Amino acid sequence: MKRMIQFYSLLIALHFYILNPSLYADNGDWVQYAYRGTIFCVAEGEEVMWVGTNVGLVVIDKVTDKTEFYNTANADLPGNTVNVITTDGEGTAWSGTNNIAIKQKEKPCQ
């Protein structure tokens, strides 16, 4: 009988844990940024987030949430596939595409 009570107690606890919506990440605080592509890399600058994809570079202003999309059609990118991004201490982001390495100023979303 004691084992049965323990089993049902565990089952009830798991039931509430699994069905509790506050435990899930998607509780309304997530923002989805529309893009078409695969994310290869993310780098955090002081004021922006840099996201490298196979269709260009996405820059998200962390203060205003403004999003800018850069690719070979609207910017001076040598290629649309951004494989790597890093930032230095001087506010510059360094990106690597399939073709060449590029540098970008810290605050392009203006």
Image (cartoon, grey):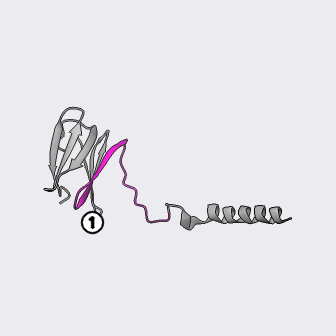
* In this rendering, position of residue 15 left or right of residue 109: right
Task: Please say whether residue 31 is one of the residues in the magenta stretch.
Answer: yes
As drawn, which residue projects farthest toward the front? 2
Task: Please say whether residue 73 is one of the residues in the magenta stretch.
Answer: no
Tell me the quadrant of the picture where the C terminus can be found: bottom left
Which amino acid type corresponds to the residue marked 1 in the rendered image?
Thr
Crowding near the residue tagged with mark 1, few <14, some 14–19, many ≥20 C-alpha atoms within 10 Å: few
Residue ID for mark 1: 64
* In this rendering, position of residue 14 left or right of residue 36: right
User: Which residue is located at x 22 percent, y 39 percent?
Assistant: 96
- Residue 87: percent from left, percent from top: 20, 51
User: Which residue is located at x 43 percent, y 61 percent?
Assistant: 30
Tell me the quadrant of the picture where the N terminus can be found: bottom right
* In this rendering, position of residue 46 left or right of residue 37: left
Quarter occupied by residue 78: top left
Using the image as rendered, state which of residue 27 and residue 101 is in the foreground: 101
The magenta segment: 27-49
Q: How many marks?
A: 1
- Residue 72: percent from left, percent from top: 21, 39
- Residue 42: percent from left, percent from top: 31, 49
User: Which residue is located at x 20 percent, y 32 percent?
Assistant: 99
Using the rendered image of the protein, determine whether residue 72 is visible from the camera's viewpoint: no
